[in-house]
Amino acid sequence: MEIQINLGNLPFGLDFHPSDKLVASALITGDLHLYRYSVDAPPRKLLDVHAHEESCRAVRFINGGQAIVTGSADRSILASDLETGSPIARLEDAHEDAIYSLINLTESTIASGDDQGCIKVWDTRQRTLCNSFNAHEDYVSDMTFASDAMKLLGARYTALTIFHLFETVKTMSFNKDVALIILMTSESLLLQY
């Protein structure tokens, strides 16, 4: 089975809804698109929101799928209502540099990574910064989280850094660019170069 969705522009980020047949896309144009997909019908666009003035680089469903959060090259983070696309909250200048990646940590926290290697942890209910790590010298290309160990793993150019939510644990270097990381267990990783 293959379902194709023509986005019309280059996607920088994609995410599946945690419990419904929805997919969100973050586009180079700064737009956020939301589609419903099914094997029985063509995909249907539910939302087309101009979320950011610069490229929309990352997208994640948050709060159990009730909202969508996006990060942008304009350094802002936007939370949008799933049903209407209306803004719930916008953090202008959330980072000093363009935001490159986002990840859910818990039901009420997310992490964002930027082009200069800074990772920030945010409380989505209070809309406040919980912690900040100067993780790398280059962009944070991807992140994953081990909830059982409360460890956040950030990837950049040729290195990974593991963080406990309150302290840096370990940095590993590689001789190739790390583009994607997948947590297999709290102790093993799958890397894509």
Image (cartoon, rainbow, N blue to C red):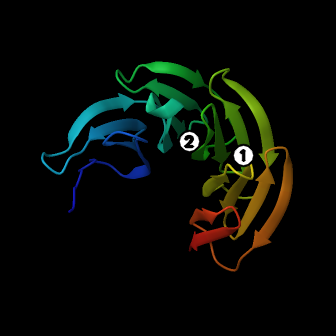
Whether residue 135 can be seen here: no
Q: Residue at (77%, 32%) from the top-left corner?
A: 130
Residue topped by disc 1: 119
**Quarter placement of the C terminus:** bottom right
Measured as percent of width and height from the top left, residue 171 is found at: 81, 65
Q: Which of the pair 90/3 is nearer the observer?
A: 3
Measured as percent of width and height from the top left, residue 40 is found at: 13, 48
For marks 1 and 2 on the same chain, the one whose residue lies earlier in the sequence: 2
Quadrant in which residue 81 is drawn: top left
| Disc 1 to disc 2, C-alpha distance | 15 Å
Is residue 143 depicted above or below 180 in this figure? above
Report the side of 93 relative to 149 (left or right). Answer: left
Measured as percent of width and height from the top left, residue 176 is found at: 64, 77
Whether residue 43 can be seen here: yes
Quadrant in which residue 126 is drawn: top right
Quadrant in which residue 19 is drawn: top left
Residue topped by disc 2: 73
Q: Residue at (66%, 47%) from the top-left corner?
A: 114
Is residue 29 depicted above or below 183 in this figure? above
Density class for disc 1 (Cα within 10 Å; few <14, some 14-19, many ≥20) is: many
